[in-house]
Amino acid sequence: MLRKIIDLIEPDNGCEGFSEGEEPTVTLVLDDGRSVKVYDNLAYEKDWDTGREISDEEIDKYSLS
């Protein structure tokens, strides 16, 4: 089943930024009420942005949470 992304939440790491070796993540807020954390570069590559859709299979495969 496809789920619509209704919001993106990116962490605010302040002026320190990310630690060495830490890969940035983003949380996708879905229309079914779930929040799914994925790697930021993956979301960019897959074009997962507000208004786009993501399948349950992709959520299961790529979710970090």
Image (cartoon, rainbow, N blue to C red):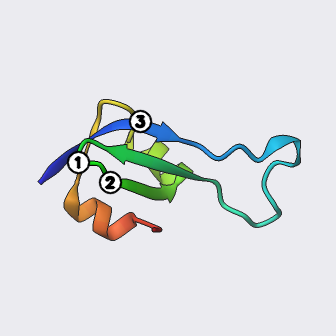
Residue in the picture at 42% in, 47% down? 28
Kindly identify which residue carries mark 1: 32
Crowd band around label 3 with a 10 angstrom C-alpha radius: few (<14), some (14–19), many (20+): some
Kindly identify which residue carries mark 3: 7
- Vertical order, 57 against 18 (above or below): below
Residue 14 drawn at (x, y percent): 82, 42
Q: What residue type is labelled 2?
A: Arg
Q: What residue type is labelled 1?
A: Asp
Q: What residue type is labelled 3?
A: Asp
Q: Residue furthest left?
A: 1
Residue in the picture at 78% in, 54% down? 18
Comparing 22 with 11, the one in front is 11
- Which comes sooner in the sequence, label 2 or label 3? 3
Crowd band around label 1 with a 10 angstrom C-alpha radius: few (<14), some (14–19), many (20+): few
Kindly identify which residue carries mark 2: 34
- Vertical order, 6 against 3 (above or below): above
Residue 47 drawn at (x, y percent): 39, 39
Residue in the picture at 53% in, 42% down? 9
Q: Contact, CB < 8 Å: mark 1 with mark 2?
A: yes
